[in-house]
Amino acid sequence: MKCRIIHESRHSMRVRMEIFRMTLDRAEALEYYLRSKDYVVDVKVYDRTGDAVITFGDREARSRIVEALAQFWWDDPKIKALVPEHTGRALSREYEDRIWLLILGRVFRKFCLPVPIQIIWTVVSGISYILKGLKCLAKGKIEVPVLDAAAVTASMLRNDFSTAGSIMFLLNLEDLLEEWTHRKSVDDLARSITLKTDKVWVKTDGPDVLTDVKSIHAGDRIIIRTSNVIPLDGNVVEGTAMVNQAAMTGESISVEKRPGSVVYAGTVVETGECVVEVTKVAGSGRYDQIVRMIEDSEKLKSATETKAYHMADRLVPWSLAGTVITWLLTHSANRSLSFLMVDFSCALKLAMPLSVLSAMNEASQLNITVKGGKFLEAIAEADTIVFDKTGTLTGSHPEVVQIVPFDGTDMSEDLRLAACLEEHFPHSVANAVVEAAKKRGLEHREIHTKVQYLVAHGIASTINDRKIIIGSYHFVFEDEHCTVNPEEKDRLDAIPDEYTHLYLAYDGKLKAVLCIFDPIREETPAVIDWLHELGVSKICMMTGDSQRTAGAVARQLKLDRYYAEVLPEDKASFIRREQEAGRRVIMLGDGINDTPALSEADAGIAVSSGAAIAREVADITISADSLYSIAALRELSMKLMLRININYGVIIGFNGSLIALGAFGLLMPATSALLHNISTIVIGLHGTTRLLNDEDYRQTEQTGKLQILPEKRTETAD
């Protein structure tokens, strides 16, 4: 594809595509094509101008980008397949266009139409507001529509049609922005919880095959195991499973699925295993189902937003009463109308959702997906944080550094069998085993029978009618009562404690111990200190590791509490106890065994590289690249709540002052309305400004990625 570079700096370039008109679909194709390249840090495509701004790391990446652009073509099916079903670009364009039409329409009527036609337009437009107010009164309610109708009617009765038009314009703009806020929140939420399951096991006549979800066709049979998210709609043809359908139907109790039952994409197998014949391929209706589920959900609103909405309605009777009392005392229409010209609801209902939406967007720039405003509030108010260890406090890419064979087995064969089992249940440790086999060039064909995953314990299957298991010491030796040759007991005891140990046993005998190096993330100590500075009084770690390993990590990180050898239900029970004690709790994890705790917490945070089910049930997802995200989210959330509270006070104080000045005859109604409208716009626009300041960011020289760098806190941690 032909394009030209119109601007370039060290880590970015702006290119203009040689095309007469860039459609939304073509803009999406270009954006997701470039995003699919690992050497591209970030990209933003502007369809109106046909430009793309591309951020990259080094000069080598720059030359590869130029080559990729030369190979790009709009109609390539492989490129089109990279674009998600819904991206949000079309929705944003729709509302941007509607807002511009509203503004241009107002300007045209104000400056281009004769005054008589302006008056007719105002009267006709005002009828709808008057009818809304009358309907509200007919229901016995005195709420914002009554005040709006009274303000419009009073202005027109005084022949002040300009003020009436301004009021209606602001009300229309408020409604449009509020609708956009709601629909964008729903859209962002729907896209964030739309399945990120990339691979699925397909049942064939031979061994099961791990296949990309996008390659699945109707009629294919896929295998769904314990704690797997069902990626596609279909019918159960083999097996029995208990399926949690809360994400789709709202049912909190799992439903048994047996041959002949229908299962839906996005639901989760809690226990059991089944084979599903696919009826709908990826992208056929899943998004729309989620939108319908959450469209009217209060989940999107924080308690602070709800308070603002209710406050606007509660102030209406007082405004009307003030109008009447001022008339009785002064017999002045101008003074009494001051109460009607200033509508608290405009600013309250506009500024609050805009602030929350802006914060959610700012979080997304840090690779943080937040599924609703109330979770930002929970993050801001939390005083307890519970961390899982593996994959969260420690790195998301542990490595197998040593394999200790037992009972005369071959090291490579042990690793091959371990990878064959672990590939069915991806977790950071399981991924390390599979990756180790891959690096050694070991192929691991399916030679075992059905695989069973026991949460927080391990994996079990059979080979040649003999049981093979892999998992924790507790699972292998205490639950399954496996043994080790007495002459090899010393070798088992000598395995270094600094590693995470994975035990492989076959036919009741230990075959191998895989030593996993799971280092603490480099940034973790600084993040813990930062969270303490931000007011989190209790930072805990809960892990299934041994007391010795957990204690060493906790002491190194200066954690307030740590709990070792815990089960998933122990984590959830601890969170419930904290909540009963009046504390608000954040849970951060990445594995299947973290899902009960993620669901129980006031805000559950999953690491993006973790298990699909963890991302599904979590309220927030953060990038696996850096734990600074959680501290940045805490600071962003606290600043959001501070902004909302300040806006709340400014709106009440400023508009209250306008009413008082009008009641004392110091401001004319038209002036009060103008100042009120200006303040509404200013407060609304201020709500969209960035919350985190430049000191919270830096542009790294090595990668060009936008990252959090609390330098003063890093020094403290050191």
Image (cartoon, rainbow, N blue to C red):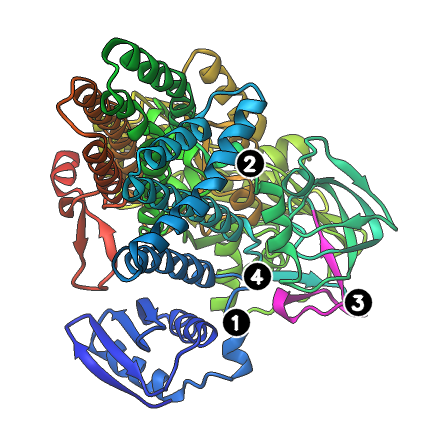
Q: In this rendering, does residue 630 appear at all?
A: no
Q: Disc 2 vs disc 3: which is toward the camera?
A: 2
Mark 1 or mark 2, which is nearer the start of the sequence? 2
Q: Is residue 303 visible?
A: yes
Which is in the foreground here, disc 4 or disc 2? Answer: 2
- Closer to the camera in the image, 485 or 135: 135
Q: Secondary structure at mark 3?
A: loop
**Looking at the image, is mark 3 or mark 4 nearer the viewer?**
3
Q: CA distance from mark 3 to mark 4?
A: 19 Å
Magenta part of the chain: 204-225
Q: Which residue is mark 2?
A: 297
- The residue shown at (46%, 37%) is 129
Q: Residue at x 38, y 41 (%)?
A: 171
Q: At 48% from the left edge and 48% from the top edge, which residue is drawn? A: 183
The amino acid at mark 2 is Ser
Q: Say whether disc 1 or disc 4 marks the residue closer to the N-terminus.
A: 4
Q: Residue at x 13, y 43 (%)?
A: 711
Neighbour tally class for label 3: few under 14, some 14-19, many 20 plus, Cα within 10 Å: some
- The correct choice, above or below, for 503 with respect to 8 in the image is above
Give percent across and percent down for residue 165: 33, 44
Q: Secondary structure at mark 4?
A: loop
Report the residue marked by disc 4.
198
Q: Position of residue 20 (x, y in %)?
A: 37, 86
Residue under pointer 3: 219
